[in-house]
Image (spheres, rainbow, N blue to C red):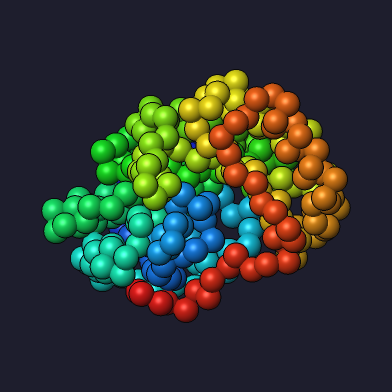
């Protein structure tokens, strides 16, 4: 698969085994920047002990407002020797992680699949979370069937013009909506542990409200509810923080106002979204970005 890489919608057709680099900027070796317990996901993912999160380097989307831009551009991280990824999964389980959380693993899918299979044979028995921008190929996601229990995708945009400006991906909604359909086909409606409230299976779709783009947010939420009803959770986020790379887009030079966010929440309630998460307080003032210091790598 790495000899002619078409793992994601970019379909770069590069030979990563010979050192050629596509849009994600990654070769044939797995590179990760951090593997540790993470407490800043939705409550049913983080729980009390934390989510066993592995942050992979590189990204096939690289949004101009990305808060993890340093690792998205591959400027942080270390190469994992063969077999190390499986060990990391088991080490996180031993530390009490509620789940294994794979953050931006799209471009390393063949290696991740192999590592999950091996780790499960060695005793990995906690849920696996696939945490993604949503810009995925259905054919690649099918590799994860039976290995991933919880999908945690974004659905960032409905507008092709907006996704082009922010992520250089005018086909984002087309690809992401097809990807979400495959994810839901694999997991079905959410299943939570009755005693702990932790998610065991299902899908949580995240949507980050962008300043000046509430109309697009409403289209995204309407699509999700009309397509999946309350068989998924929807996480509506207000933590947008202006980043230098977004300076050329005027409306993205500020934070989301309280009025904008409240308007989106009211719309979600109006159309009948009943299972979801919201962010309270000044979340844009908080840092959801851990130190990418190679902890656990």
Q: Residue furthest left?
A: 121
**Would residue 257 appear left or right of 229 to someone viewing this image?**
right
Location of residue 90 with respect to 212 vertically, above or below: below
**Residue, far top:** 226
Q: Is residue 187 left or right of residue 207?
A: left
Q: Position of residue 294 (x, y in %)?
A: 42, 77
Placement of the C terminus among the 4 image quadrants: bottom left
- In depth, the one of 19 and 121 nearer the eye is 121
Q: Position of residue 20 (x, y in %)?
A: 40, 58
Name the one closer to the observer, 235 or 245. 235
Can residue 186 be seen from the camera position used here? Answer: yes
> Which residue is at a point 73% across and 58% down the rendered structure image?
281
Numbered-mark total: 0
Q: Residue at x 56, y 50 (%)?
A: 61
Is residue 291 shown left or right of residue 185? right
- Relative to 279, is 287 above or below? below
Q: Position of residue 140 (x, y in %)?
A: 36, 39
Please tell me in which quadrant of the rendered image residue 65 appears: bottom right
**Residue at the location (75% across, 38% down)?**
264
Give the residue displayed 14% in from the left and 58% down from the top: 122
> Is residue 271 left or right of 9 when viewed as pictured?
right
Quarter of the figure with residue 287: bottom right
- Is residue 27 something one can see in this rendering? no
């Amino acid at each position: 698969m790495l000899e002619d890489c078409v793992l994601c919608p970019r379909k770069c057709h590069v030979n990563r085994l010979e050192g050629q680099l596509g849009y994600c900027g990654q070769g044939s070796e797995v590179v990760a920047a951090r593997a540790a317990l993470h407490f800043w996901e939705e409550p049913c993912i983080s729980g009390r002990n934390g989510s066993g999160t592995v942050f992979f380097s590189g990204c096939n989307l690289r949004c101009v407002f990305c808060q993890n831009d340093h690792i998205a551009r591959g400027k942080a991280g270390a190469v994992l020797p063969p077999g190390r990824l499986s060990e990391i999964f088991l080490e996180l389980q031993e530390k009490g992680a509620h789940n294994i959380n794979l953050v931006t693993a799209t471009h390393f899918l063949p290696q991740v699949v192999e590592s999950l299979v091996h780790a499960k044979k060695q005793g990995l028995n906690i849920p696996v979370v696939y945490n993604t921008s949503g810009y995925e190929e259905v054919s690649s996601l099918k590799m994860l069937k039976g290995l991933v229990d919880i999908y945690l995708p974004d659905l960032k945009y409905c507008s092709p013009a907006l996704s082009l400006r922010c992520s250089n991906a005018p086909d984002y909604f087309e690809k992401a909506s097809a990807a979400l359909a495959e994810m839901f086909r694999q997991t079905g409606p959410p299943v939570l542990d009755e005693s702990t409230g932790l998610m065991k299976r299902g899908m949580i779709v995240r949507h980050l409200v962008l300043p000046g783009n509430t109309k697009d947010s409403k289209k995204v939420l309407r699509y999700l509810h009309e397509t999946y009803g309350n068989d998924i959770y929807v996480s509506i986020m207000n933590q947008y923080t202006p980043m230098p790379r977004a300076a050329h887009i005027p409306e993205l030079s500020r934070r989301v106002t309280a009025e904008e966010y409240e308007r989106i929440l009211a719309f979600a309630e109006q159309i009948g979204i009943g299972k979801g998460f919201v962010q309270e307080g000044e979340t844009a003032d908080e840092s959801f970005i851990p130190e990418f210091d190679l902890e656990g790598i």
